[in-house]
Every structure is written in structure tokens, then in C-alpha cells.
């Protein structure tokens, strides 16, 4: 009986080894993934360089139409700070006035400057005294696809005409989550 038992165990062991060699081993693991969409504000402008020429007509103004594009999953506010140098006005309150017309095209900007070159309707204005200040330009609602807004730059010299020269300004835009 002992002899029969050991043959049976040996046979079972051989079958187990053979069976193990032909069986596929499968192991699984799981990974939990959390995707978090963070608040995002992204904006850019159609033209990184703008040139305005004054002294080319009786109204002594010029405008340049561009665009502001943005995509965001939260509402935001766009501000602008204008730095640089402008000439000393030849008359009080005069001198070069620089404007940004958010959400306004060229024709409407020209009309607004002609209506009041010191503070045109629909614009934010900077003159020599206001350089270095920040003004709020635009409240941007959530836009999950790219939105394109007309954005016009302008300049005029109401009340006086400076001597010929080039004046450089830098506009620094900031978009902040509301």
C-alpha cells in the first residue's frame, strides 16, 4: 500500500508540474486616477506691435484695430498698465492722449475720439500724467472656446501739437480671476 501511495503522489506531482507549465498566470492591479481641471485664464492679442502716426490729418488722430482673444473656464478681469514716455503738453490738458478701446472697432473709435479727444466714450485713456497707472479694461465671462473681441488702439493730440519725435509706450495686460 505504501508503494501504491507513493506512485500516486508522484503521478499527481508530475501532472501538477505539467499543468503549471501550461497554465497562464494572470495578475491585476488597479490605479485610481483623479483628473482635476484647474481654473485657467488664457488671453493673447492679435498684434504684439502697434504703430500710430499723428500729424497726418486735420483731426491729428490715428487708430489701429486689433483683437483680443481669450479662453477661460472662470470669469476674469483684464487690466492694463501703460508705461513709457510722452512729451510735455504744449497747453494744459493737451499733449498726446493714448487710448485703448476694448470691444470696439476702428470706425467707432474714430467717432469717439472726434467726439471728445480728452476722454472718448468707450475708451480708457492715458496721457503724460497718467502713465504708470492701471485701469480695468474688460470683464471676461467664462468662455470655454476661444472668444475674439475687437480691440482698438488710438492716439490724438487735442489742444496742441508736439514737436516731431517718436514716443514708445508699453502696455502690460493682466487677467485676474474674478
Image: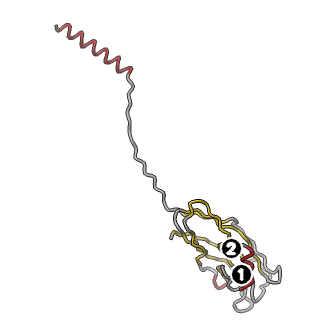
Q: Is residue 34 above or below residue 131?
A: above
Q: In which quadrant of the rendered view does residue 78 lie?
A: bottom right
Q: Which residue is at the far left?
A: 1
- The residue depicted at 64 percent of the width and 81 percent of the height is 131
Q: Position of residue 146 (x, y in %)?
A: 61, 61
Mark 2 vs mark 1, CA separation in Å: 10 Å
Q: Which residue is mark 2?
A: 104
**Is the residue under label 1 in contact with that under label 2 (CB below 8 Å)?**
yes
Marked residue nearer the N-terminal end (2 or 1): 2
Q: In which quadrant of the rendered view does residue 162 lie?
A: bottom right
- The residue depicted at 69 percent of the width and 83 percent of the height is 120
Q: Secondary structure at mark 2?
A: loop
Side of 58 where 167 appears, left or right: left
The colouring scheme, among rainbow, by chain, secondary structure or one colour, is secondary structure
Side of 145 where 13 appears, left or right: left
Q: Secondary structure at mark 1?
A: helix
Q: Position of residue 26 (x, y in %)?
A: 38, 30
Amino acid at each position: 500500500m505504501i508503494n501504491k501511495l507513493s506512485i500516486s503522489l508522484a503521478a499527481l506531482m508530475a501532472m501538477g508540474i505539467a499543468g503549471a507549465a501550461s497554465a497562464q498566470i494572470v495578475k491585476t492591479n488597479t490605479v485610481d486616477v483623479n483628473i482635476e481641471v484647474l481654473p485657467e485664464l488664457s488671453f493673447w492679442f492679435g498684434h504684439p506691435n502697434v504703430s500710430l502716426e499723428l500729424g497726418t490729418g486735420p483731426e491729428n488722430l490715428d487708430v489701429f484695430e486689433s483683437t483680443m482673444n481669450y479662453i477661460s473656464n472662470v470669469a476674469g478681469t483684464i487690466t492694463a498698465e501703460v508705461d513709457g514716455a510722452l512729451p510735455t503738453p504744449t497747453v494744459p490738458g493737451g499733449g498726446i492722449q493714448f487710448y485703448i478701446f476694448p470691444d470696439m472697432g476702428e470706425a467707432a473709435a474714430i467717432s469717439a475720439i472726434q467726439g471728445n479727444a480728452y476722454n472718448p466714450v468707450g475708451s480708457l485713456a492715458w496721457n503724460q500724467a497718467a502713465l504708470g497707472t492701471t485701469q480695468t479694461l474688460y470683464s471676461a465671462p467664462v468662455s470655454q472656446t476661444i472668444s475674439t473681441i475687437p480691440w482698438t488702439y488710438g492716439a490724438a493730440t487735442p489742444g496742441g501739437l508736439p514737436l516731431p519725435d517718436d514716443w514708445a509706450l508699453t502696455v502690460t495686460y493682466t487677467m485676474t480671476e474674478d
